[in-house]
């Protein structure tokens, strides 16, 4: 695959995973929204994941539109941090409801964990690749300039 196709594929990957994080808890892997008339942690977690997922999808779109390696590395690093936040929200920061037999515990939480960790690890690998590419380009340009002098 050419570099541009890989670049677009990576951006599309992050858009898809951002959309899954955003709409998954509400429409795909259903959460329990109320327990005896009170909003549960699951509802608030789903709302927080909606915002994080939208940000991840927008970063994926920005990734497709960008071309310079340092900017791509920065976008990829921000995808790592947002993916980690998407993982932390349901597991540590906000949590899910206390009922171990509910769909939010059995389906939503594992689904969000797999999606957010996959996105985080893919973005981390991409960030390392881009930083190495940038350092290699910078060394190559410095060597070429030193040879000219």
Image (spheres, rainbow, N blue to C red):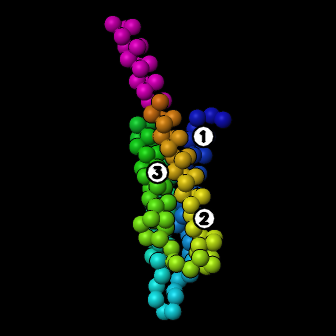
Of tags 1 and 2, the one toward the viewer is 2
Q: Work out whether residue 62 can be spotted.
A: no
Question: Which of the two discs, 1 and 2, labels the residue nearer the N terminus?
Answer: 1
Which residue is drawn at the image coordinates 58% and 52% (left, top)? Answer: 118
Is 35 a magenta residue?
no
Q: Work out whether residue 46 can be spotted.
A: yes
Q: Nearer the viewer, residue 19 or 145?
A: 19
Q: Which residues are magenta?
A: 133-149
Residue 94 x, y percent position in the rendering = 43, 70
Q: CA distance from mark 1 to mark 2?
A: 29 Å
The reply to whether discs 2 and 3 touch (Cβ–Cβ < 8 Å) is no
Label 1: which secondary element? helix
The reply to whether discs 1 and 3 touch (Cβ–Cβ < 8 Å) is no
Which residue is drawn at the image coordinates 46% and 55% (left, top)? Answer: 84
Which residue is drawn at the image coordinates 59% and 73% (left, top)? Answer: 105
Quadrant of the drawing holding the N terminus: top right
* Residue position for label 1: 6
Of tags 1 and 3, the one toward the viewer is 3
Label 2: which secondary element? helix
Q: Is residue 34 above or below residue 114?
A: below
Label 3: which secondary element? helix
Q: CA distance from mark 2 to mark 3?
A: 20 Å
Question: Which of the two discs, 2 and 3, labels the residue nearer the N terminus?
Answer: 3
Residue 137 x, y percent position in the rendering = 45, 24
Q: Which image quadrant is residue 69 in?
A: top left
Crowding near pointer 1: few (<14 within 10 Å), some, many (20+)?
Answer: few
* Residue position for label 3: 79
* Residue position for label 2: 110
Q: CA distance from mark 1 to mark 3?
A: 17 Å
The disc at residue 61 is none
Crowding near pointer 2: few (<14 within 10 Å), some, many (20+)?
Answer: some
């Amino acid at each position: 695959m050419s570099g541009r196709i890989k670049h677009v594929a990576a951006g599309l990957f992050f858009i898809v995973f951002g959309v899954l994080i955003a709409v998954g808890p509400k429409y795909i892997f259903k959460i329990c929204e109320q327990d005896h008339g009170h909003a549960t942690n699951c509802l608030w977690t789903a709302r927080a994941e909606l915002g994080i997922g939208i940000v991840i999808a927008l970063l994926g779109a920005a990734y497709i539109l960008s071309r310079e390696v340092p900017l791509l590395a920065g976008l990829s690093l921000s995808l790592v941090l947002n993916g980690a936040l998407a993982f932390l929200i349901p597991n540590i920061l906000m949590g899910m409801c206390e009922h171990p037999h509910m769909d939010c515990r059995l389906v939503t939480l594992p689904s969000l964990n797999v999606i957010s960790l996959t996105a985080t690890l893919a973005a981390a690998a991409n960030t390392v690749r881009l930083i190495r590419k940038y350092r290699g380009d910078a060394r190559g340009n410095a060597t070429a300039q030193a040879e000219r002098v």
